[in-house]
Structures are given as C-alpha cells and as structure tokens.
Image: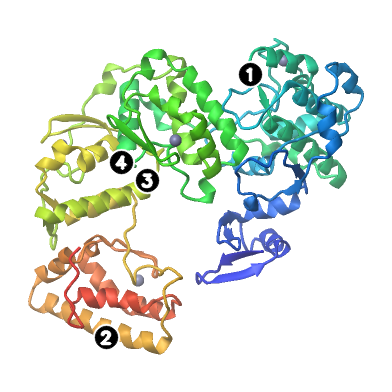
Amino acid sequence: MYYYYDDQNVLQGPYSNSALQKWFQKQYLPAGTLVYDKYMQPFLIEYVVNRSLKSRTKVMFHDDTFNLDRTNLDVTLHLCSPELSNTTSSSEDFTQLEGGVDEVDFGRGFDYIEQRALLNRRRRFPDTYCPFENTWNNWVPEPIEMNVALRGAIHTHNMVQTFDERIISGYLNFLNIYPHPCQLCDVKFSNSKEMLEHFLSVIHIQRSYKTGGTFSYIDLYCARKIIYEVEMSYADKNFDFLADDVHFQSRKMSFFDEFDILTAFESLKSTVAVSQGVPLLSPPRNTLDTLGYVEAVVFLRVFQEKYKRMPEALRGRRFGPTGKTWCNYCKVEFDATFLESFPTHLFSEEHIDNALYNGVSRADMEYWLSFMEPLMNGNCKRVRHQDRVEVSLQESDFPLCYVPVGRVEGDFSYTGKDMQPVLKYVSDEIAASFDLLDDYKYRTTCRWCRTDLFTRNGVLRHILHDKCHLDRLNSVSNDDLRRLLCSLDIKIRVPLFRQSKRTSSPMDVKEKKFYLQRLRNVCSKKLNNFFSSHQRSTLSQLAARSFPVGLVNRCDLCDVTIDRVDAMIMHLSSEQHIANLIESPRISNNDVQYWLTIFNVDGRRSRVF
Ligand SMILES: [Zn+2]
Ligand SMILES: [Zn+2]
Ligand SMILES: [Zn+2]
Ligand SMILES: [Zn+2]
C-alpha cells in the first residue's frame, strides 16, 4: 500500500499497487512522482510499478547471524533444506555434478537486479558486474568456499545452456554485461551467453580460487536472479529488454575530467570542508540516494580497483582535515590527512559492516569515482600555461570575499558577536544541500589573505572556513549572504513561507482568519511607517534582530522568489499570500506566533538569534 501527495500537497491513500500501476500507465501519476510506503519512506513510482510487475523471486537466507533488518527487505525467507548441507561436503570431483544439481544454497540475497535496470540510468558510473567473473577481496560479505561456488555455478550453467542465445545475451546486455575477454584465462567470446557460461565453468572457478580471492553468495544470488528473470520473460513472452533503447549511456563526464591534478586535489579538500564531512563517511540522506546492498558492494570493489590504479605519488597527497577525521558509521576518529589512510579505514572489516548495514550514498560514491577516474593511469590533464591565466575579479564579485562595495539600499550588516552564529547558519545550510559533484574553475586571489584559489568550492571553503579569512572579517552584509545563497540555489524559508511539518497542530479556518488578520494589521503598520516616514532602517533593524528572516528568499506557498528584505514583508501581507495561507491545511498557531514575536506583539521580546 502506498500514499502520495496531490497538487494541494495533501496526502492521499493508501492505494494498492495495481491502482498505482493504472495511474502510472495513464500518466495521471507520471514517472518521477514520489510515493510513500506506510513508514513514509519515499520511492519513485516507476520503481514501485516495475517491482510489482517483476518476478516473485524466492530468496534463501543461509545465515541467521547476519545483522540486517530483514523487515525492510522485499524478499521471501526460506530455510535451507537439511539434505542441502549434507551434499555440499560430498565429493571433490565436480565433473559428476555437471549432469544435474537441483538444489543449491543461494545464500542471502537482495532484490538487486530489479533495481539495477532502473537505477543505472540515473547513475554516473555504470557497473559492469558479471557474477563469477572476478573474485573479491577478503572484505566481501559472505564469502563462500570453492565447492559451494562450484555447485551453484554448475547448476546455473546448466540452466543458461537451455536458453536461446539471442534472449540470454540480450538480457545480459540489458544489465550492461557485454562480451569481453576473461582476463584470468585469456579467452575471448563472441557473445555474452558464451562469456557467462565460461565464468560459470569449473575451470574458471577453480583457477579463480587458486589466485587467492574468493567468490561470495552475492555471485550466486545474482547468477540465480538472471536465470529467474529470463525464465519469467519466457513465461510471459515479454522480451522488452531486447529493445534498443534499454541500453544506458556510458559514463558521464564530470568537472574532474577538466581539472589538472593540483586543482582536483584543491577541489576535493574544499568539498570536504564545505560539505563538513568526507564523502562515504556518512550514511545517505534519503532512500533515493542509497545504493542497493549488492550495488554498494560492487561499487566498493570498483573504488578499490580505481584506487589501486592511481599513481603511488598521488596517494601521499593531503586531502582531509589535518589529524583527525570522524567516521559517522563507526563513530571513530582516524587520521585521514593523506589520501592513502582513507582506503585503509574504508575497507576495514568494521567499516564495511557498518556501511553496508546503514547504506552507502550513491552521490558520495559517484563523487569518489569521478575524482579517481582521470587520476588513474596518470590521465589527468597536464597543467598547461594558458590554464594558469588568472582571472582578475572585481571586488564584490564573489560574496564575502572582499569588503562589500556598492551597498544595496536597505541592506544591513551583522557585526561583532552576531557574526559567528550567522556564518555557522549559512555554512550549515550550504553543507546540508550541497551537491558534491558541482564545482568549477574559478581562479582568483583573496586580496586580504593573498591566497590563490582555483575552484568555486575553494572560494567557498576559504570564505566560510579558513581561519585567516574569518579573522579579518568584521562585518557580514546581509545582501552578500543573500547573493551567496542565491548563487548556490539554496532556498531559505521561515514559518508561513513554507508548509509546516505535519506533526504540528493545525488551526481551524476561523481561528486562522483571526490570527492572520491580526498579523496583517501589524504588517501594514510597519509598512506604513516604512513608506510614510522613510524609516528604511525599521525593516532592516527588524530583519537584523530576527535572523534568519533577512535571508528569506522564497515562498513555497505562492511559489515565488523573494529578492529583498522589504519585498518579503510586503509579500507576507499580500492578498495572494494570505489567501494561500487560509487554504493551506497545515498552518499552526506556532507559525503565526513566530511572526507576532518578531513584530514584538503580545508583550514578548523580539527573538534575537
Ligand atoms: Zn576465465
Ligand atoms: Zn568507518
Ligand atoms: Zn581571504
Ligand atoms: Zn506567499
């Protein structure tokens, strides 16, 4: 059962999957619409609809000791049959098994491949994971012994043989698995079916184990899942995956492809400072940003491979805060001053456990892969002389960089002890809505500190976090902050300019009309003062002592952008805004009180920070 928000932002539901399916097909709820389960976890509607159309794959858990919360998994729990555990320890002669293995232990599995096809299109990096192709390092969850791997692989191999080459190869291509040589055995293949059959062969698996790696239940589960999917498509006579347009594009370019090594590292360091954390050391912010379980494991391996291919010299470079870096998963501090200390923690047993349990952020992973991609093989752009041309920026071009010039009328500043909480608020807002993969070249020099800066994030880090710069700053202009937030597309809203959280107590219409009228009277009085007696300072004083009111740049209820402090007060008492407030079902008494307190009504002192 799922819920969704209608045009009026009212929660509708619960509705069944088939209802969603119907509305999705009729475009009444188009792709991209968010629907919510009973725990109010968001999902894309196409994901929910596709999932209900897909197979009812049975999944076996082989190990009760794993600490995953199974209530979140859309899978059926099966216990392993007793005869299964007997057979695994039987013969070492696997050629006997090739005739028929009908019961195989498939371990713990997840609805990985159901998600893959959907998520691949939204990813910057396609994964090219083919089960049983490459062994894993010792950090992989649930490694399996060779005889277990062989039994599962042979069983799957026998199934693959029964499929039409065009169908199974087509399905593998749909999963981004295209024919390529086996590096280990040095064999070439003419199609994906042939290739998969090789990876599932006794010779390939035995050779793989001899190199010291291991396979995992993930390989078994994913191989099994491919078989189920193809069987289902035969049963339903649905071969949509053979269409041309299912193939996703190759890797998207990132700004790192344009950076030289120096700039790339500056950007990384700055991003770590501005986002207030090292990517991959915190759980994802939401479900949509969370990699699927197996997807996360696959990408961790990709991370490791890319890191190994980075030149030694680059691994010793600085990237994080000096001394201690905090891992939000493991709740420990470790020294990540230099790049090489990062993977040591990332691939520690404790961290892998914690990260897979709490989820890994897709944005964070894509950030690291984008960063390493051009640095591997020393492919990173050489610093050419013309790249070094310094852009001469006029003062006030970048907010907070220099003493503001050309003051905006009605503008005001925060000074003295007010500055620190203001800057902290702004830094936190920026960190909270920071798009990691969003940086660009911005060569400039801070004239105060005589510091060269190379990227946009470098400038942000400098003005918000570098001590040398903050020590010189003795006043912050409100207009500067507004321009800064606006340039980063960060929306600041306060009560009555946004929908309240649904937990607060809503008012009935009569009560609401009474309070809003009262608020409007107060507003008009302020505005009258403002226009009649030219007390331009009144509003700025009001905004200055009721931070962050001076930064509000957006009204969600009316869907408008607000460009100045006085425009905001005018908007608050406008006909349109009041009408929208009356209509909105989620305006609470606290929202109105917030403003009455600012206007110093009800005998309360105005809120100062
Ligand atoms: Zn091979
Ligand atoms: Zn950790
Ligand atoms: Zn500076
Ligand atoms: Zn409004």
In the displayed structure, does residue 394 sit left or right of residue 193? left
Which of the two discs, 1 and 4, labels the residue nearer the N terminus?
1
Disc marking residue 518: 2
Which of the two discs, 3 and 2, labels the residue nearer the N terminus?
3
Q: Nearer the viewer, mark 4 or mark 2?
A: 4
**Place of residue 426 in the rendered image (x, y in percent of width and height, measured from the top left):** 26, 51
Location of mark 4 (residue): 274
Location of mark 3 (residue): 434
Which of the two discs, 1 and 3, labels the residue nearer the N terminus?
1
Ligand 1 within 8 Å of the CB at mark 1: no
Q: Are marks 3 and 2 in contact (CB under 8 Å)?
A: no
**Place of residue 215 in the rendered image (x, y in percent of width and height, measured from the top left):** 68, 25
Q: Which residue is rendered at x = 88% and y = 29% of the image?
A: 101
**Place of residue 1 in the rendered image (x, y in percent of width and height, measured from the top left):** 67, 64
In the displayed structure, does residue 11 sit left or right of residue 144? left
| Mark 1 and mark 4: Cα distance apart in space | 39 Å
Q: Nearer the viewer, mark 2 or mark 1?
A: 1
Residue type for callout 1? Gly
**Place of residue 313 in the rendered image (x, y in percent of width and height, measured from the top left):** 37, 14
Residue type for callout 2? Arg
Location of mark 1 (residue): 213
| Mark 2 and mark 1: Cα distance apart in space | 73 Å
Examine the image and state in which quarter residue 316 appears: top left
Q: Is residue 250 above or below residue 464?
A: above
